[in-house]
Image: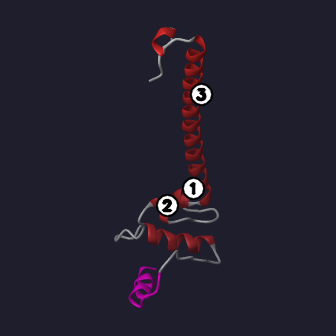
Amino acid sequence: MSLIRQAAISEGHLVGPIVTLSYKNHALDEILLDVVNHPMGLLSSPRALIRCGNAEDQQLKQYTEQHNAAEKSAQVKEIYAIARCYSILINLRLFHLSYTARAGCSIGETGLASPY
């Protein structure tokens, strides 16, 4: 695949993703293992390869679409949880400001600890 990519680049073609199809899963896994284990390090990152379908080889499991989807789902949940905590903090701050305004006192006089 590296030779195909280099030839395309040398002729001035834009090179995007390379799609590899195979009639048998075993043959596809062998091609992908050659890419993963290449001594020149053909993959720029673990996310540079996505194996659609079930990988028979354990080394390719991390590249399956199911694995990537589960990892992305966990990241999205973590980001949502952080955003929710920030939202709660902002709402507490607004409540605190509203309370002090209605009580007619400064923030320090309420006896409530400032979140900042």
Residue designated by label 2 = 47
Where 86 sits versus 112, above or below?
Answer: below
- Residue 31, how many percent across, how many down? 51, 74
- Mark 1 vs mark 2, CA separation in Å: 8 Å
Q: Is residue 30 magenta?
A: no
Q: Residues within 10 Å of mark 1 (few under 14, many from 20)?
A: some
Sequence-wise first label, 3 or 1: 1
Under mark 2, the amino acid is Arg
Q: Residue at x 55, y 46 (%)?
A: 75
Residue designated by label 1 = 68
Labels 1 & 2 near each other (Cβ < 8 A): yes
Residue at the extreme left of the image, as rendered: 40
User: Dot 3 lies on which element?
Assistant: helix
Where 50 sits versus 96, above or below?
Answer: below
- Residue 57, how many percent across, how many down? 54, 62
User: Dot 2 lies on which element?
Assistant: helix
The answer to which quarter of the image holds residue 101 is: top right
Q: Residue at x 48, y 15 (%)?
A: 107
53 vs 105, nearest the viewer? 105
Which circle, 2 or 3, is nearer the viewer? 3
Under mark 1, the amino acid is Asn
Under mark 3, the amino acid is Asn
Q: Residues within 10 Å of mark 2 (few under 14, many from 20)?
A: few
The region drawn magenta spans 1-14
In the rendered structure, the answer to whether residue 1 lies left or right of residue 100 reads: left
Where 98 sits versus 87, above or below?
Answer: above
Residue at the extreme bottom of the image, as rendered: 11
Q: Quadrant of the C terminus?
A: top left
Residue designated by label 3 = 91
82 vs 68, nearest the viewer? 82
